[in-house]
Amino acid sequence: MNLEKVKKIYFIGIGGIGMSALAGIAKAKGFLVSGSDSSDVYDPSKAVLDKYGISYHIGFELKNIADFNLSPDDLVVVGAAIDLENPELKYAKENNLRMTGYPELLEVLVSDKRRIVVVGTHGKGTTSGLIAFVLKELEDSGFFVGAVLTDLQTNFHYGSGPNFVIEGDEYRSGIDDPKPKFAYYKPDLLLVNNIEFDHPDIYKDLEAFKAPFKSLVSEMKEDSIIVYNADDINVLDVVSKSVAKKIPFSLSEQKNYKLPGKAYAYDYLAAKTTLEALGFDFKQFEKYFLEYTGVKRRYELIYENSITVIDDYAHHPTAVRETLEATKQKYPQKRIVCFFEPHTYSRTKETLADLEKAFNSADLVYIAEVYPAREQKLPSSISGQDVVRAVSRHQQNVFYVSDKRDALDKYRKEKKDGDVVIVMAVGSFNTLVYDLKKELGA
């Protein structure tokens, strides 16, 4: 894609965290930027758009894009969830405007940088955030991460440095583009932290899930680098035939810093190995490892007083289990209370056998209704009550909560000083931690 004649870029679906960040990068590179979204835009996307002075419209209307006066040389970026009947998308098609998805544009905007792409089923946000934080502090390099770095209060930075860190999402790029987002990023250095089956709505099994990772690796050249987890059998399979320079890491070498548990140990070790592969000595970045406080909604400490409240993004059974195990390890004498919102009907149904055993380190569990995200509820769809029944086969204190008010009411009757409350939510429950904080008087 050639951007030589592009002056304006319009984003249909600008309120998404990736789309808002990309709009910010485009504005930083000198393009005139605008866009729209279906409903109110919330932080962190709103903060990004406001910070960069990017105007946007609430509600999709033909007038929004028409009034931006795009020329045939300009560009329209279409969000992955945009409906084909969207009036702004129809306008773009009818007027033969140039259109793209955000992964393809991101690669072009940072094509002059050395691209460090972080992929894997778990820990992408924490790991790419740590590498991004260090490289920004060391050399003002840029990044594009799927969560806000708590230290920097942003999920992207263009930067003047030579490197650019990208969190590589394996989900499809758009409603009519089945390629995973990371397929567009052309990594100079690829970090593969772990691979476990996910997204059963688009991948039928583990082998189908691994296929795009293998394709990504096969396209890398001899002068590129793959940093990989040598303890993960699926990762070993994916990288085995690559001609790129391969640098392994293993937990036997790990040095866990602040965050508890095996999963975070891998994240830190992956970041350390990547930075050393880029030519940095550990002494150059050790202090930034100690300073790093993570990314928002990834084991983020929200409140700590008589009760501790932690916000987390875990939704895959492995992430749930390891996060709760880590919490028990960090707070061995405390009662662990977990609020969990299952994410998508397809994932919840496919992984229920593992999910029902994932809460064994919690003492009290509240399970919400399934958050559908991009999926439609059918009469046959799995429910939150189904999950409660499954988890109850392994422990006693498991309760269904219909909404956030119900969650607060039920916990209010059970709370005890010393509780460690961890909220694992992706959708409508993702502000419960702040409701709990307010409930506790903060």
Image: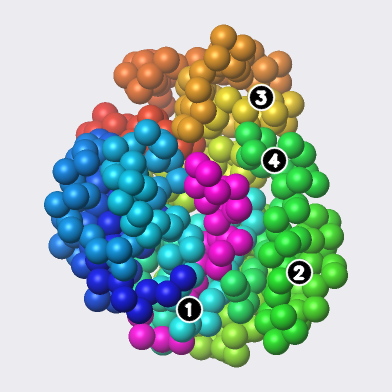
Give x and y (percent) for residue 89.
Answer: 34, 44
**Secondary structure category for the residue under label 1:** loop
Give me the residue at 23% from left, 60% from top: 70
Disc on the earlier residue, 3 or 2: 2
Which one is in front, 340 or 58? 58
Q: Is residue 38 magenta?
A: no
Query: In the image, is residue 31 above or below residue 265?
Result: below
Q: How is the image coloured?
A: rainbow
How far apart in space, not on screen, are marks 4 and 1 (Cα)?
29 Å
Q: Nearer the viewer, mark 3 or mark 1?
A: 1
- Assess whether mark 1 and mark 4 are in contact (beta carbons under 8 angstroms): no
Instruction: Decide which of 432, 78 is in the foreground and name it.
Output: 78
Task: Reply yes or no: does residue 176 show up in magenta.
Answer: yes
Element type where label 3 sits in the image: helix
Sooner in the amino-acid sequence: mark 2 or mark 1: 1
Q: Is residue 316 above or below residue 221?
A: above
Q: Is residue 42 above or below residue 168?
A: above
Q: Amino acid at mark 4?
A: Tyr
Q: Are marks 3 and 4 in contact (CB under 8 Å)?
A: no
- Kindly identify which residue carries mark 3: 349
Element type where label 4 sits in the image:
loop
Q: Nearer the viewer, mark 3 or mark 4?
A: 4
Three-letter amino acid code of the residue under disc 1: Ser
Q: Mark 1 sits on what residue?
A: 111
In percent of the image, x 15 and y 62: which residue is there? 53
What is the C-alpha distance between the residues marked 3 and 1? 40 Å
Determine which of the numbered discs, if any, sits on residue 218 in the image: 2
Q: Is residue 246 visible?
A: yes
**Would residue 249 be seen by someone viewing this image from the given angle?**
no
